[in-house]
Image: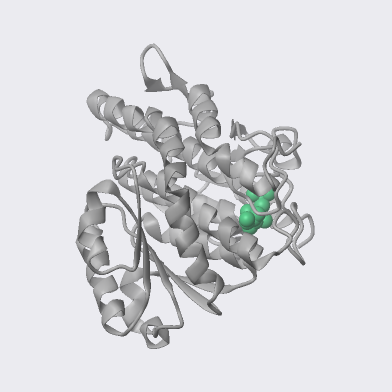
Amino acid sequence: GKDGYRHYMEKELHEHPVVIGQTLQRLIDPATRRVVLPDLPFDMASVPRAVITACGSAFYAGMIGRYWLESVARIPVDIDVASEMRYRDPPLTPGGMGLLISQSGETADTLAALRGMRAHRQHIVSVLNVEQSTMARESDVVLGTAAGPEISVASTKAFTAQLSVLACLAIAAGRQRGVVSPDQEQALVASLLDLPSRAGEVFDQADAIRRMAAVIAGARDVLYLGRGSSFPVALEGALKLKEVSYIHAEAYAAGEMKHGPISLIDQTVPIVATVPSGRLFEKTLSNLQEARARGGRLLVFTDTQGAERLRGIAEIVVAIPTVDEFTAPVLQTIPVQMLAYEVALLKGTDVDQPRNLAKSVTVE
Ligand code: F6R
C-alpha cells in the first residue's frame, strides 16, 4: 500500500534515503569501507572502453555514470539512448564493457542494445532493479539496485539507487586501474555513506519546493539548466515535470543557453537551475545572471554553501545539504523530482498513472 502517502510517487520519493543506504550496503564492506563488487568476468584494469545505454531516466543516471567513469576511473565512455544505440552500429572493440541500466530489466530498446553489444563481444554489466528479468538472464554480471518495487510510473527512487551502484563501480574501476588511491577511495566511500542521512534532510525543504511549484504550475514552458553532472539532473527534472504535470519543459547544459534557448527567456518561462557549490558554480552563476538580465524568473536548487550567492539573483532558492562534488548529483536529484510531484498535485493530474505512459516499455 501507500503507507499513508497520497500517491506511490510521494511514498517512493520518501524512500530515497533508505534505498541509497540499502544499495550501498550491498557494495561497500563496512569493516574496510572499500567497494566490493561481484566477480567480473573481465579485468577493469585493462578494459578499453565502456559503452553505456539505457532509456529515459535510467539514461540520465547513465550520463552521471559517464562523468564518474571518466573522471574517477579514467575509462573512455560512449553513451547513447538505447533506441539510437541499437541502430547506430558503432564499431566496438571486443572485450569492452557494455553497461546497461534499467529499473524493469524488460525495456525493449535496452534489451535490443544489450543483444547488439553481446554480438560485438562486449562484456555485459547490467544495473537492474528487477533481478528476475530478461536483461538479468542475458547479462554477464548484474549489479542490483535495492530500490524495492517501484509502482509509480514516473521513476524516482530507482534513479538514486542506480547512481549509488554507478558510483561504486567507478570507485572500484578507478582502484583497479591505479588512479584511485586507498586514501581517495576512503574519502569517496565516506561521501557515499553520508548520503542516506543527507538525503533525509532534503525533505526539510518541502515548503520552499512548494513555493517553486506554485510558480511552475502557472507556466506553459519551463527551462531546466545545469552544468557537468548537474546537467543530467536538469534533464531528469524536465522529464519528470513533463511526465506528471504535462507542462512542457526542456533541459539544457547551462553553457549552451547562449547558443539558442536564451531567445526563449522572458517572465513567462521560469528557469529551474541546479547549481551545487564546487568547480562549476561560478560558470553556472554567470549563465543565470544572463538569464536574469533578460527578465527570466530564476528558481534555483543549490546547497547551503552556494545559497548566499544565489539569494541575490534568484526568486526562490532551495538549499539542500552541502556534500562532496562527487555525490552532489545524487542529492540534487531528489528536490527536482519532488518539484515535479508538487506541480502535479497543483495540476490535479493522475500522478501515479500519467496519460499515455506505461511502467515498462516492452515494445519498440
Ligand atoms: C521516467 C521513466 C522512464 C523510464 C524508462 C526506462 O520517469 O519512468 O523514462 O526510466 O522507460 O525504463 P527502465 O528503467 O525500466 O528500463
Q: Quadrant of the N terminus?
A: top right
Pick the front one: 262 or 247: 247
Q: Residue furthest right?
A: 363
Task: Give the image location of residue 318, x and y in percent.
Answer: 37, 55
Q: Is residue 116 visible?
A: no
In the image, is 354 to the left or to the right of 45?
right
Q: Residue at x 35, y 48 (%)?
A: 70
306 vs 150: above or below = below
Q: Is residue 267 visible?
A: yes
Q: Residue furthest top?
A: 31
Task: Give the image location of residue 222, x and y in percent.
Answer: 49, 74
In the image, is 137 to the left or to the right of 118?
right
Pick the front one: 13 or 96: 13
Q: Quadrant of the C terminus?
A: bottom right
Q: Residue at x 36, y 79 (%)?
A: 296
In the image, is 341 to the left or to the right of 47?
right
In what quadrant does ligand 1 lie?
bottom right
117 vs 144: above or below = below
Pick the front one: 277 or 313: 313
Query: Residue 342 sits in which quadrant?
Result: bottom right
Task: Give the image location of residue 39, x and y in percent.
Answer: 53, 23
172 vs 126: above or below = above
